[in-house]
Image (cartoon, helix red, strand yellow):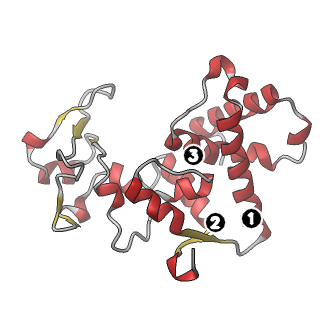
Amino acid sequence: MTEEDTVAAGPFGNWLTQFRASLRGNQGSEVPCGDCTGCCISGYSIQLRPRDERALARIPAELLVRAPGFPRGHLTMPPRADGVCQMLNDGKCSIYEDRPQTCLDYDCRIFSAAGLESGKTVIDRRVRQWHFSYPSRADREAHDAVLATAGFIRQKRESFPANRAPTAPTGIAVLAIKTYVVFLDADVGTRSDAGIAAAIVEAARLFDSGAQS
């Protein structure tokens, strides 16, 4: 890949802080998508929460269905038969300024950060183009830790209690970003695989509880 083929993903540390805040629901992600509409044409159903009032006001009710497995009041907008989002018209989002939180939160840089591909052809074209910068040593160390965590989750699934480690790329990437601090520990190499898995599970619990910044 030439330099002309790359797309700036931003400083890794800044992105990591922003994305971890997004995972907690504190904010969406500011993704420099440019003219890429990969996530809009890759067959995703869009979850809408009750608080997505502006989006719900603009999406025709007949396009929405009850979201299975989600709390009461949550709805889903399935894609068209060709996998394109029903709000994408002439290559542009028709409700961009009022798009739901699901769209605000989506950031395909997570796959680049974790050294994975999404499994969606168009999205993975952009995933391969993302290029993070490393203004400080801490940026580089954080990215190395995310990559190491994702690799461990993929390769050592049997080390987790009841094999309860994600297998889908998104789940692996999200868990690695939540728990990368485990691989920042200088003593991680002295632990058993089961010990590392237990530390990842605990780090995820702390992150989800808000106890870990």
Looking at the image, tell me whether mark 1 or mark 3 is earlier in sequence order. Answer: 1
In the image: residue 34, left or right of residue 93: right
Q: Are marks 1 and 2 in contact (CB under 8 Å)?
A: yes
In the image: residue 198, left or right of residue 175: right
Q: Quadrant of the N terminus?
A: bottom right
In the image: residue 38, left or right of residue 3: left
Q: Depth check: give the residue in front, 211 or 16.
A: 16
Q: Residue furthest top?
A: 162
- Mark yes or no: residue 28 visible: no
Q: What residue would you read off at disc 3?
A: 173
The kind of secondary structure element at disc 2 is helix
The kind of secondary structure element at disc 3 is helix
Q: What residue would you read off at disc 1?
A: 140
The percent coordinates of residue 154 (x first, y second) are 65, 37
- Mark yes or no: residue 79 visible: yes
Q: What residue would you read off at disc 2?
A: 12
Q: Depth check: give the residue in front, 137 or 121.
A: 121
Dot in front, 3 or 2: 3
In the displayed structure, 106 sits above or below 37; it is: above
In the displayed structure, 174 sits above or below 19; it is: above
In the image: residue 8, left or right of residue 184: left
Q: Amino acid at mark 3?
A: Ala
- Residue at 73% across / 30% down in the picture? 197
- Residue at 78% across / 46% down in the picture? 183
Looking at the image, tell me whether mark 1 or mark 2 is earlier in sequence order. Answer: 2
Q: Amino acid at mark 1?
A: Arg
- Residue at 7% across / 40% down in the picture? 62
In the displayed structure, 17 sits above or below 207; it is: below
